[in-house]
Image (tube, rainbow, N blue to C red):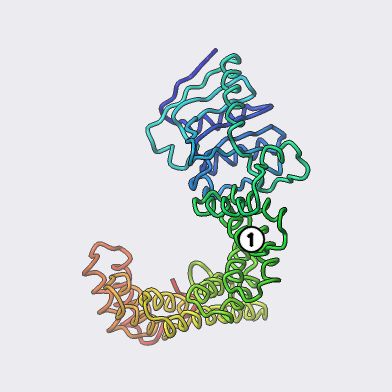
Amino acid sequence: MNNEVLFNNIKPKIQEELKKSRTSVYLAVAWLTDDELFADLIQLSNKGIGIKIILNDDEINQKSGLNFSELYRNGGLIYFVDSLRNLMHNKFCIIDEKVTINGSFNWTRKASNNLENITIIRDEIISKQFLVQFNELTKTTYQSPEYHNLENSENLKIQLEKDLSYDELILRAAKRKENASYIMAIHDYRNALKINNDDKNILFDLAYCQSEVGDDKGTIENYSEYLKHYPNSSAAYNNRGIAYERLKEVNKAIEDYSSAILIDEKLLYYENRAIAFSSFLPKNGDIYSQQENVTENKSDYLQIDFLKKQGKNANQDYLTILKKFQDIDRQYYYRKLSEISFIILEYEMSLEYISRAMANGKEDYSDYYTRAVLYLITDNFENALLDINKALSYSPNSSDYKELLQKIKREKLKPKNWFKPNNVW
């Protein structure tokens, strides 16, 4: 039968066995958060292999970040056990109803770092016994309706419907939402809407739950419908903006954050808009790092002007936060201002903001390094030397700090300013 027992390199072995699948994979694990194992299941479902999964309905699985919708689109099914009543602690996988993988190994991101074991049993009789247990478990679970067309599945409708009243559904949905059982809360809110479609308040909570499970398109759809009836909801605009941003529709996100600010000037809305503006900027280096060559090409300069504008917009929001709100981490916001000013080549402003950051919080030697760089760029060599030596007093073995010290000493001796924007490191 060629059975195997493993205590090490478990995940690669599971992946190897999954690749051999030809017809079906039935998985019952307490928790599923491993992106690579889930990607393997998606790949199998793309090939037409039947995938069924049983999981606990708890915060770990609901916030796994895995795109369950893709599995549903391929015909896969996921069943959830009410973990508040019965914790499902099985960890087995049946492949083609012939091979069973059983043991202590959960399919999570951390499991590979734990002391775990699995046994691979290549025996159809034993696999059938596990399959019986798998089918028994599905009778005590809820099948997630997320991304699933309930109208075309009468059996599923019968399984899910609980003959609850509207008020009971809303109450249960709220409790499930509070317990982070978002998929089941979505189910209850949708059923409540079928009973009473006039109560548009449900759409806000439904959209919130959809956002928590990563259904950004559904989130946008329901917040949009909600805003038709409650156009002064700043929270709905803000939350829809977050969904747009996750879909890389940054301009729409900025519009929504701006609408939220017009209704209610909350710190969160300003910060979200600042982050959206700054998302246009390069992650490393300055705005010239976006161009391989800054030439006479007009589009190059238009792009740089656009990036400068976005950086200034972000900084304006951070300045507004510093002006309007009192109990905040001022050092954090001054650092953000300095960082963005550096990226958009406003070195004097960057220098001013990092100095303010240093005056508004705990001393941090990395700030001295940052300011030394800015002093060097602006030809203030004496202050650059003072700051880099201060940084070195905290971290005398830093190769970066030592290198900068030598650079400052060399540049101090040069007859003119050597620095050009595309030399920023």
Q: Quadrant of residue 15?
A: top right
Q: Look at the image and tell me whether residue 325 can be seen.
A: yes
Residue under pointer 1: 202
Residue 328 horizontal side relative to residue 290, left or right: left
| Residue under the point 60% across and 21% down | 132
Q: Residues within 10 Å of mark 1 (few under 14, many from 20)?
A: many
- Residue 164 percent location from the top left of the image: 64, 46
In this rendered view, identify the residue nearer to me: 176 or 265: 176
Asked if 23 appears above or below 395 in the picture, the reply is above
x and y percent of residue 305 in the render? 60, 82
| Residue 125, placed above or below residue 316 | above
The answer to whether any part of residue 289 appears in the image is no
Q: Nearer the viewer, residue 379 or 391?
A: 391
Q: x, y (%) of residue 215?
A: 63, 55
Q: Callout 1: helix, strand or loop?
A: helix
Which residue is painted at 59% across and 41% down in the image? 39
Q: Residue at x 52, y 52 (%)?
A: 175
The outermost residue toward the right is 152
Residue 290 spot, x, y in % from top left: 57, 70
Along the viewing direction, whichever of 250 and 87 lies nearer the viewer: 87
Q: Amino acid at mark 1?
A: Ile
Quadrant hosting residue 17:
top right
User: Nearest the camera: 363 or 198?
Assistant: 198
